[in-house]
Image (cartoon, helix red, strand yellow):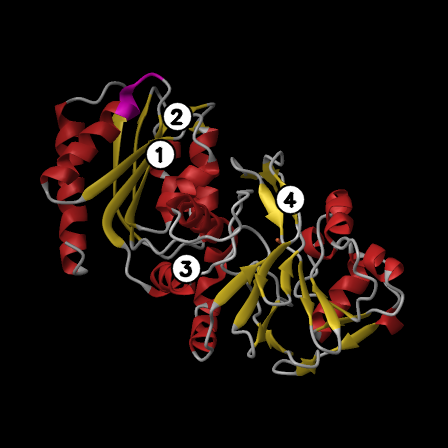
Amino acid sequence: MSKIAIKEDIFWVGALDPDRDVFDGLLPLPQGTTYNSYLVVGSEKTALFDTVEPEKIDDLWANLEGVEKIDYIISHHAEQDHSGSIPAVLERYPEATLLCLQKNKELLLDLMTIPEDRIQVIEDGGEVSLGNKTVRFMHFPWVHWPETAVTYIPEDKVLFSCDFLGSHHSFTEIFAGDNPAVYKGAKEYYVQIMMLYSKMTAKHLDRLAELDIEYICPSHGSVYDKPKIILDLYEKWMRGEPDNLALIAYVSTHGSTKIMAEQLKISLEERGVHVVLQDLIGLPLNELAGVLTDAATIVLGSSVIMAALHPLAFNTAFLVDRLKPKAKYLAVIGSYGWSPGPLKKAAELFPTYKAEVVGAVIAKGHPKDEALHELDELAETIAAKHKEAGLL
Ligand code: FEO
């Protein structure tokens, strides 16, 4: 995709990567991604905001065709999908100076070969003039690395938010508008990349609230031309209460745990609790992520296999423990053949997660009346907890 004007003298010059199907070797990218680089032409200086994944550098060169001089390369973040082409850009534009925060400089020097004398460190809150445009640097640590910065051009009311507020897709329409697919992707991206740090980073929203923002230009995905939509969503995801929703994520080898999960769903819905039932077999992580941030209760369901919980349940428990969704309650259900121990110990799979464990229902083989009754009791407990929390 070629260069696109966002505002006068502010251009998207990045690269689409529709064929990339996974990030970090873990996160599915059903719609690919983008590496957003922006060119800002001031009356005196020209600046390039971030670069692209090195394998996409030809796209960047094509979008910079005719740009004879770059005075500044602004690096928000040292991760290579944005910084990896900095050495090549510095080489092609020998008069360019790399501007970044001190922490970013240290990481960049660790991660790639950059002549240190080409780097100028800017303080948090520091400003650099491009003539008729000013670039203000703001340190936004832990979105999602410790050095990450965002920048703001007050004259144009444009925020460059780096990974913060981004999304993975490669739509050729650059502006988000009201497109629900953009915000669905942004939510999955938030859960996978940002949610773990949300307690530390929600305060960044207060800093953004002080700015008059017309466009948000993240480093992945769409440019937000209606910035209130994504900012309101982040407010809800980061600081809002969870919904009156139980996520039942289960894996069943011979159908018994599935029966239990379905019975619990019916019992919860009878009591007014909304339910998302997710069979973990074949479930892409991004689909699970889309629900994780909303649920007030997470129920993990598993069979016992190899004298342990099913690996898909293990993996889900690990992700919940690491991603730390804001669910308040946790429960375990499952069926076993001859070894109930793994299910009895399942809550130990969440060593750092703070949600209250509200119950476990364990059945030997096909769930009988006793187990079904216990599932009703668990549903009653969950509904009571949701009421107590003011969610139901
Ligand atoms: Fe898109 Fe943290 O790099």
Q: Is residue 364 visible?
A: no
Of the numbered discs 4 and 1, the one sitting upstream in the chain is: 4
Q: Nearer the viewer, residue 89 or 392?
A: 89
For residue 304, the mark is 2
Few, some or many C-alpha atoms within 10 Å of disc 4 (few <14, some 14-19, many ≥20)? some
Question: What residue type is disc 4 on?
Answer: Met
Which quarter of the figure is the N terminus placed in?
top right
Sequence-earlier tag: 2 or 1:
2
Tell me the SS state at disc 2: strand
Depth check, front residue: 114 or 58: 58
Report the span colored magenta.
254-258
Res 343 label: 1
Q: Please tell me whether mark 4 sits on a helix, a strand or a loop.
A: loop
**Residue 100 image offset from top left, x and y in percent:** 72, 72
Between tags 1 and 3, which lies in front?
Answer: 3
Q: CA distance from mark 1 to mark 3?
A: 40 Å
**Disc number lying in front (4 or 3):** 4
For disc 1, the neighbor class at 10 Å (few under 14, some 14 to 19, many from 20) is many
Find disc 3 in the rendering and name its residue. 230
Up-down relation of residue 185 to residue 362 (above or below):
below
**Picture quadrant where residue 91 is located:** bottom right
